[in-house]
Amino acid sequence: MNITRSEVKITVAKLLEVAYSKDKGLTAKIMAEKGKAKLIVDQSGKATLTGTVGSLSFSGTPVLNKIGVKIKRVTINFENKGKMKVGYTATFNLEVISLTVMGNFDLEELITSCSGLLCRAARALKGRHKAYDMELQRIMGR
Amino acid sequence: MRFILLLFVLVLGACATHVPDEVLYSNFLDYKSNITRGNIIESSPNFFSKQLLDKLNLTSSEVTEQLLFKNYMAKQINNIEIIGDSFGCLTVNGYDLENMPMSFNLKYIEVEQRWLIDEINVLFANNEADLSKVPKCPSEYNN
């Protein structure tokens, strides 16, 4: 079965979660700054989150491997419209097609979910917590 | 006088029934109705460009599913296209299986008087207002 809209949205949230776990302060600063930010994952799995206040690199491979579909490149354009409301356009280049998903989320809600009990419970498990995925899906929209 | 009147009626009739050419869309409809999981290896060259297919393993289920991208859309709303010198772009707007708005943005190239799909973008929008009213090429979403 092909990758779905929901899977793309959850993946966007998980990539932000990895950035956040690597550098909480800088990720929050980049994302909370009003204006544009960009997250790119190249073919080697190297992820870079860039905004006006700086940039951060981390590995996107563990997140992308979970999807189970070969992904050549990910480009996510974020736009913080103020008051923690972030809109995004995420394009996943697969082997044949590219998939673009438009969405928006509340940054505060996403950050809270990743530092809350549910996130810690999910991290305590070796695999992924289904309830956590559902929570991310709720935050990122249908 | 009667001849002029007849000519006027004919011209008016022709104008009323004139439909803009939908070269790419008719090609898309052909793809949609004729390509299946069962015939994908033989049928693909009729719908996709050589450069798109060259790098692909058509026996891989992952590749097959992506070539059958038509299955993402459950209901069509409209279609718009633009054709240039050697390529054209077609946007098909509609709804996915969850009744959420989506589009196909396809780049076609002309090879030996046939239009073949060369690039494919599947767009999932949040609202119907996000769906494009002008044809979009897949490259517009790849940066």
Image: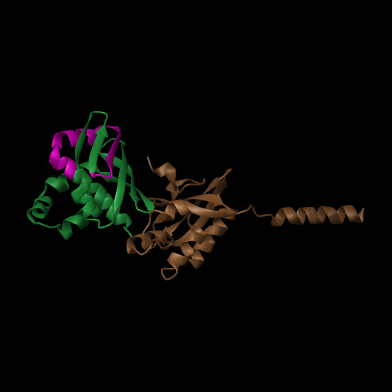
Nearer-the-camera pick, B133 or B40:
B40
User: Residue at the spot x=16%, y=48% of the render?
Assistant: A113
| Residue reaching furthest to the front | B54
Nearer-the-camera pick, A81 or B86:
B86
Q: Which residues are magenta?
A: A18-45
Q: Quadrant of residue A4?
A: bottom left
Can the viewer see residue B72? yes
The image position of residue A60, as x and y in percent, is 21, 45
| Residue reaching furthest to the bottom | B38
The image position of residue A110, as x and y in percent, is 20, 46
Nearer-the-camera pick, B91 or A98:
A98
Q: Is residue A6 magenta?
A: no
The image position of residue A108, as x and y in percent, is 20, 42
Picture colour scheme: by chain
Can the viewer see residue B98? no
| Residue reaching furthest to the left | A124
The image position of residue A1, as x and y in percent, is 32, 64
User: Residue at the spot x=55%, y=58% of the render?
Assistant: B27
Q: Quadrant of the C terminus of chain A?
A: bottom left
Colour green maps to chain: A
Q: Is residue A23 left or right of residue B34?
A: left
Say which colour chain B has: brown
| Residue reaching furthest to the right | B1
Q: Is residue A22 magenta?
A: yes
Report how many numbered discs are placed on residues in the image: 0
Q: Is residue B134 left or right of residue A108?
A: right
Q: Is residue A135 left or right of residue B27?
A: left
